[in-house]
Amino acid sequence: MKTRIAISSLLALALLVPAISVAEIPAGPPRVSPMARISQVVGVSEVEIVYSRPGVRDRKIWGELVPLDEVWRTGANEATTFTVSDDVKINGEPLAAGSYGLFTIPGETEWTVIFNKVADQWGAFRYDAAEDALRIQVKPRSAPFKERFQIAFSDVGADSTTVSLRWAEVEIPFDVQFDVDQAAIDRAREFVANAQPEDGRMVWNWANHFYQNDFNTEEALEWASGLAQAAPMYWTHALTARLKAKAGDKAGAMESARLAIERAATEGDQPGVTNDLETLKGELASWEGE
């Protein structure tokens, strides 16, 4: 079924900006181990970790303050929580989207990192291994001294990031990897299905993303064609032309390209149109010559 977006002017619409909220601060007096909240976006997905940061304070950490071979809350106060917006792979092992308690079992030569289905709990006092969603084994490595326990993101890539747990002179890293393409498709479908008249520009952005990255182009063509019908402008026709060409519909591509060129002559100067118009004319000539 064709998607129709009822908009009057594509380029006049602004992108919706999500509201920014302040992280919830625990009630009560200042804590010796302050709370921290970190997040990282990977593609269109997000990882968020909420934890408390104890200090070394001249104590022996591993094997004394934090016993070896026992479940640790991985911080202080409440259990550390690990939330992912989409399904992920942790060091190659699958973990479903959701919130988890992040526990660890420190060892001399190997640590166990645990993702427990009960995210909201105090410390590890009521930890239940039967609720574990995933366990992975990680080799600890030496690191520069860190007075306060720290969880950080590093090596952020197009589809993955590394989470590093660091305290005293020990670092525990593990990888978090998303299926970025599938997450993007899911987000786009949800957005288009609920699009309002003012959302036309973002619909165009999603269709253009799939064109530029050469996947999910059938749906992208459906969305771009709907926009071109509802808002016949240079950019909507030009994108439709390119997606039709990618789909092998050269006749349709030429028709849409000519409509785009006609619109460019009547719409007045728009950002980027002059340069793109010359590119589109070259593409049209190549399609006509095939």
Image (tube, helix red, strand yellow):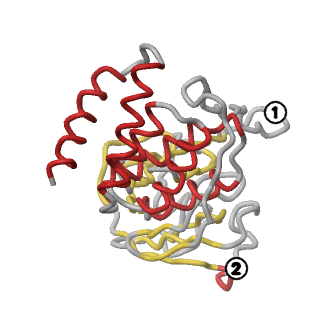
Q: What secondary structure is marked by label 2?
A: loop
Q: In this view, does 251 lie above or below 239?
A: below
Q: In this view, does 24 lie above or below 164?
A: above
Q: Residue at x 34, y 61 (%)?
A: 247
Left or right of 45, for residue 258: left
Residue 131: x and y in percent read 68, 80
Q: Residue furthest right?
A: 28
Q: Nearer the viewer, mark 2 or mark 1?
A: 2
Residue 157 seen anywhere in this rendered image of the structure: no
**Among numbered discs 2 and 1, the one appearing first in the sequence:** 1
Q: Are marks 2 and 1 in contact (CB under 8 Å)?
A: no
Badge number at residue 279: none
Left or right of 169, for residue 285: left
Q: Nearer the viewer, residue 206 or 171?
A: 206
- How many numbered callouts? 2
Left or right of 63, for residue 257: left
Mark 2 Cα within 10 Å, few/some/many (few <14, many 20+)? few
Residue 262 seen anywhere in this rendered image of the structure: yes
Q: Residue at x 47, y 48 (%)?
A: 207
Q: Residue at x 57, y 49 (%)?
A: 226
Q: Residue furthest top?
A: 269
Q: Quadrant of the C terminus?
A: bottom left
Question: What is the distance, in whole Å, between disc 2 and disc 1 at their CAs?
Answer: 30 Å
Q: What secondary structure is marked by label 1?
A: loop
Q: Which of 11 and 185 is in front in this view?
A: 11
Give the labeled residue for mark 2: 128
Residue 202: x and y in percent read 56, 39
Q: Quadrant of the N terminus?
A: bottom right
Residue 240: x and y in percent read 42, 47
Give the labeled residue for mark 1: 29
